Every structure is written in C-alpha cells, then in structure tokens.
Amino acid sequence: MVDPPPALASARSPIEATLAEAATLVGLRASEGELAEAAGALREHIEAMLPTAEEHAATLWRGSPEWYQLRSTLDAIQSEIASAPPPTALSGHVRVELLRRSCAWLLEHYGPGATQEVR
C-alpha cells in the first residue's frame, strides 16, 4: 500500500492521538471534566469525517444490504453525537468508549487515506 501524502498523514495524527487519549481515560478514574473534554474532541473528529461517509452512502443503491448496513451505522453514530451529556461518571466512560469506537471506525473507512469499504 502506498503511504498517504504528508498532508493527509499529518491530518490523521491528531485523530489517532485523540483515540489513544480516550482509550487511556476509559481505563482510568477520569473526572467528568476530562471525560467531557475527550467526548468533545471525539465528536469534532466524527463530525469532520461524517460528510465523506454520507457522500459514500449516497452513491450506494438504496435498499441494498451495503446501503442498509452503512446507513444504520451512520444513523447510530449521529444519534451518539447528538445525545445529551451523561449524568454520571460511569455513563461518561461508556459514552467516551462508544464515541472512540465510532471515531476509529470512521477513521478506518472514511479518514485520510481510507478505502471507503463497508464491512
């Protein structure tokens, strides 16, 4: 596989750093403020990659299994980022983990240098 151009590679680094930080916070007794900050950073990255995923979904045959799978995933991600802040620290940890997984999935499929395959 060919390495992405430097501009794309550098765009990928902040997202990966945020993912690593979120994974660390989930495993610790992080404060609600730290969790909220991580959730906000993850939400920003997700919102930046969603338009590309939406464009790809629009190119698929509506009603196909691939379209349905992608549409369901994107709808779930949009629901996650639109939900209210969690009321407890435990639910804050869960939210950060869900956002981290969604962000990682978008990065793999629709981030800089991704192949845009639905799996």
Image: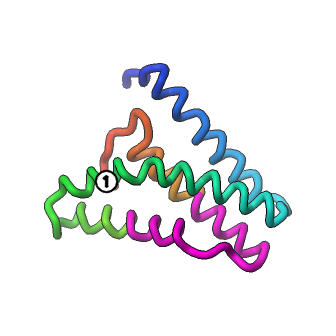
Query: Residue 24's spot in the image, x, y percent?
Result: 75, 51
Say which residue appears at 59% left-offset and 56% top-offset. Answer: 100
- Marker count (numbered): 1
Residue 115, placed above or below residue 23:
above
Q: Which residue is mark 1?
A: 118
| Relative image position of residue 85 (x, y in whole percent) | 66, 73
- The amino acid pointed to by label 1 is Val
Residue at position x 52%, y 53% in the image: 103
Quarter of the image where one finds residue 37 = bottom right
Q: Quick check: 83 left or right of 69? A: right
Verify whether residue 21 appears in magenta: no
The residue sitting at 61% across, 37% down in the picture is 14
Snapshot quadrant of residue 87: bottom right
Residue most toward the left? Answer: 61
For label 1, the SS is: loop
The type of colouring in the image is rainbow
Residue 86 lies left or right of residue 44; in this view the side is right
- Say whether residue 84 is magenta: yes
Residue placed most toward the observer, 114 or 41? 41
Stretch in magenta: 74-99
Which image quarter is the N terminus in? top left
